[in-house]
Amino acid sequence: MLLEILGLFPSDFFDRSKARGDRQGRKVGLGLTNRSKSVPKPQNMASILQIKPITGVPSHLRASAQPQDPAFYQNPYPFYARQNMSHPAFFWEEYGHWCFADFKSVSALLRDKRFGRDILHVASREEIGLPAPKPHVADFDLTEKYSLLNLEAKAHTRLRTLVNRAFVSRQVEQLRPRIKQLAHELIDGFEENDSVDLIKEFAAPIPAIVIAEMIGLPAEMAPQLLNWSNRMVTMYMYNVTRETELDANQAAADFMAYLREVIAERRKAPREDLLTHMLTTDRDGDVLNDEEVMSTAILLLNAGHEATVHTTGNGVKSILESGLDPRTLFATPEQAEATVEECLRFDAPLHLFTRYTLEDTELAGIALRKGDVVGLMLGAANRDPNRFANADSFDPFRTDGANVSFGAGIHFCIGAPLARIELQESMKVLFERLPKLRIAEPPRYGNVYHFHGLERLMASWK
Ligand code: HEM
């Protein structure tokens, strides 16, 4: 049943900060940040909007790349290389804020407490120019209120600590056999064909099924979960109408009503699943309330899927294009780990995350004001020639492979151990079962720059 819902979540669901910028900052943001009239604003804003315009940027620190230009999003790496070689800290015209492309800065900024995914814990809406919340999207806002990705400082630590245990390596290690089994079943399903879209038939099902099973929601509900999720994410799109907002809010209300019922059932009859874990986990008498559990379940269902799908697609492409023998790349558990790390570094699925500047400060000679947005370019940092030898070569045997694809600091991906296991097991099975696997048509990346993943990956093996 879950296989029917593949292709699941729209690609720009993941960057929650964008939602805040779009929904709350759009009127102010668009009006004020459109300072460069010759440069069209990107439709899929990867970032929270810069509210107060940044002026007086010297021309040598300005760079332009249109995120929706196919030439750019099919291959953003030449732009990254140029910036890393000239000005790794630069003002990206189309986004209207400062960005950092080098490994050292990105890695440091992710950990820097002067920057945060949220700002409302240190500033009022008035101070940074955010409009008041809209009452007709109150249910939607409630699902976001306790999202780990929207919390900072103490509130974040508390929630994360209570959820974390389910995601530590020794817990998720137990899922290896299930992931292997799923990979085999999926290949059994298409092996007789001449070719297949590996994204749809192989990469997508595995993380979707694994996270749904982990949370403990029945597979029959999957299409409905997808429906709610899809309607909710329309809220993050450009130029949202009131009608769309009302529909997204209704979806959020229905999603929460369903989760409330399941939560009530679990309270009466606990099970061995993540939902029960979240409801019962206790730290010095502190437990999660229902809203927190609902927010977290919704976030995990969405975040737990798409980036892994894209890493599988990008990784299989990188391996097949490298000319290396895929079987040697998964020959031992250690080499499988190294290969997956190189896939994550070489062609990361998430290229741009943003942070608010929480206090006036200076960075790389740039004066940043409280409320300014900075872009952290994960995909560029992973190809920084000052950090990696032959940064633009795919080399699963490299020894300098640490990357920032899962972020760093307090928001470091909670699902990283799970994603790594999913990638190691699924790719190993794929290349073992189909040793003659090859790309059947030139793969193309989807038009969501910051979410770097293939639209499809047609492959054959006979
Ligand atoms: C290859 C796959 C994945 C990649 C590349 C990835 C990447 C990331 C990144 C970069 C962040 C940090 C965002 C920021 O700092 O602004 C993040 C956070 C997060 N990820 Fe992942 N992720 C992946 C898979 C998963 C999976 C499988 C799950 C859940 C099962 C998951 C759940 C989360 C959650 C809940 C957060 C927020 C953590 C927090 O704010 O404390 N991710 N992920």
Image (cartoon, rainbow, N blue to C red):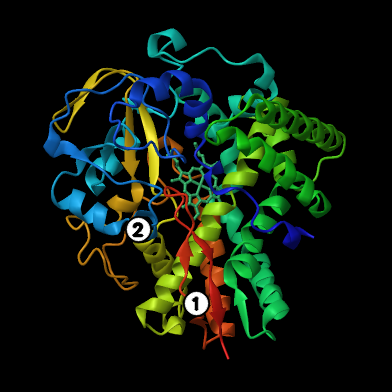
Relative vertical location of residue 67 with respect to residue 316 in this rendering, above or below: above
Quarter assignment of residue 111: top left
Which residue in the protein does label 2 denote? Answer: 71
**Quick one: which residue is furthest to the front in this view?**
38
Q: Check disc 2: other Cα within 10 Å, few if <14, some if 14-19, many if 20+.
A: few
How far apart marks 2 and 1 lie (CA) works out to: 18 Å
Relative vertical location of residue 115 with respect to residue 105 in this rendering, above or below: above
| Quarter containing the C terminus | bottom right
- Residue 118 is tagged as none
Left or right of 438, for residue 242: right
Q: Of 24 and 182, which appears nearest the observer?
A: 24
- Secondary structure, mark 1, is loop
Give how far across and how far down residue 42 sits, in percent: 41, 40
Q: Earlier in the sequence, mark 2 or mark 1?
A: 2
Residue at the image point whose x is 34% and y is 52% from the top: 379
| Quarter containing the N terminus | bottom right
Residue at the image point whose x is 66% and y is 77% from the top: 187
Is the residue at mark 2 in contact range of ligand 1, meaning its CB lies under 8 Å from it?
no
- Residue 441 is tagged as 1
Residue at the image point whose x is 64% and y is 62% from the top: 206
Give how far across and how far down residue 426 sits, in percent: 57, 70
Left or right of 249, for residue 92: left
Q: Is residue 50 in view from this perspective? A: yes
Q: Check disc 1: other Cα within 10 Å, few if <14, some if 14-19, many if 20+.
A: few
Left or right of 443, for residue 108: left
Tell me which amino acid carries mark 2.
Ala
Give how far across and how far down residue 329 sits, in percent: 42, 78
- Secondary structure, mark 2, is helix
Is the residue at mark 1 in contact range of ligand 1, meaning its CB lies under 8 Å from it?
no
Q: Is residue 151 in view from this perspective? A: no
Give how far across and how far down residue 226 sits, in percent: 72, 47
Relative vertical location of residue 205 with respect to residue 353 in this rendering, above or below: below
